[in-house]
Image (cartoon, grey):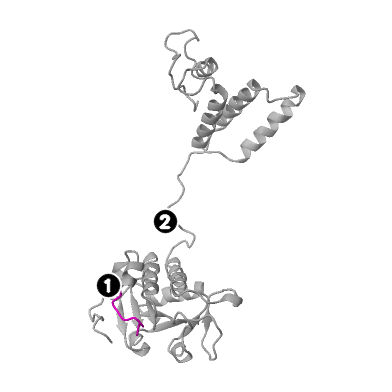
Amino acid sequence: MSSSENSNVKSPAGPAIILVEPQLGENIGMVARAMANFGLSELRLVNPRDGWPSEKARAAASRADHVIDATRVFDDLASAVADLNFIFATTARERDGFKPVRGPVEAGRALRARTQAGQRTGILFGRERFGLYNDEVGLADEIVTFPVDPGFSSLNIAQAVLLMSYEWMKSGLEDETKTNFSSPEMQPATKEQLHGLFAHLEAALEARGYFRPAPKKPKMVDNLRAVLTRAGFAEPELKVLRGVVASLDYFSPKEPRGAGYPERKAKADRDSHKAAPADDEDVPRQGGKGTDND
């Protein structure tokens, strides 16, 4: 065991990730980053080809320095797993022997249960080119394998670590479908607000001659309402649509937004708010913004 091992290392909250004879510092760094993404922090290296520490690994870790700084290096696999109670070995090919084989979901849950029971656990990952030797798999308790395409089953080592780290994190959630953030909560629109959109849109389309021929107007209106009621709009969404309709309805290249206050817009605002008559002085005529979301 090298001097990089710290005998005072605090027991981690999750399984140790053990890389057997990793070749590239960049790969080690990407492994550290994948671990940090999902709350793992204990990385063990067995005889890394290019030595340790590695600035290439630190650069590829993308600020997962706490994982890099705590990395421990061992001369052989037996020393790397000596203090562990339970180990999974990852492999993409069938092995001779009698070890149970798990999928990643089941393996993540098993690791979680053993960790909660106070056991020290670990996951073995082999060399980038050909994985683990049979005698190395023999040091593990069980095998975990991924449901990959048999015709192209080789995984990048960082990808394999990412998959297992994700399953570890997911196994600890009360709800496995829970996310760290969600969409904003929006109040569903009232039927009055929805009917206001209907009326606004119908009036705008009527002014543009959309309902042709006239006898088909009732059916065309029914179709529009069927489309708009299917979506189940929230109140803020209706305000956006009202603003769009208002812009198309009241303004044009000849009367663009900001250049004036079209009379149809002024009338609509008066009708909506029961305001003063059209010729009242407090109705803005030039330069007014209007109320597009009414």
Q: Horizontally, is 29 left or right of 228 in the view? A: left
Residue at the spot x=51%, y=34% of the render? 240
Q: Earlier in the sequence, mark 1 or mark 2?
A: 1
Three-letter residue code for mark 1: Asp
Three-letter residue code for mark 2: Asn
Task: Identify the secondary structure beneath mark 2.
Answer: loop
Task: Identify the secondary structure beneath mark 1.
Answer: helix
Quarter of the image for residue 135 reads bottom left
Mark 1 — residue? 69
Q: CA distance from mark 1 to mark 2?
A: 27 Å
Quarter of the image for residue 66 reads bottom left
Q: Residues within 10 Å of mark 1 (few under 14, many from 20)?
A: some
Residue 103 vs 225, above or below: the answer is below
Residue 231, x across and y down, in percent: 60, 41
Residue at the spot x=50%, y=23% of the render? 256
Camera-side residue of 10 and 77: 77
Q: Are marks 1 and 2 in contact (CB under 8 Å)?
A: no
Camera-side residue of 205 and 61: 61
Q: Horizontally, is 19 left or right of 229 in the view? A: left
Q: Which mark is residue 202?
A: none
Residue at the spot x=62%, y=36% of the render? 228
Mark 2 — residue? 180
Residue 97, x across and y down, in percent: 53, 91
Quarter of the image for residue 75 reads bottom left
Residue 41, x across and y down, in percent: 33, 71
Residue 141, x across and y down, in percent: 45, 86
Q: Which residues are magenta?
A: 47-54
Q: Is residue 52 magenta?
A: yes
Which image quadrant: the N terminus?
bottom left
Residue 137 vs 53, above or below: the answer is below
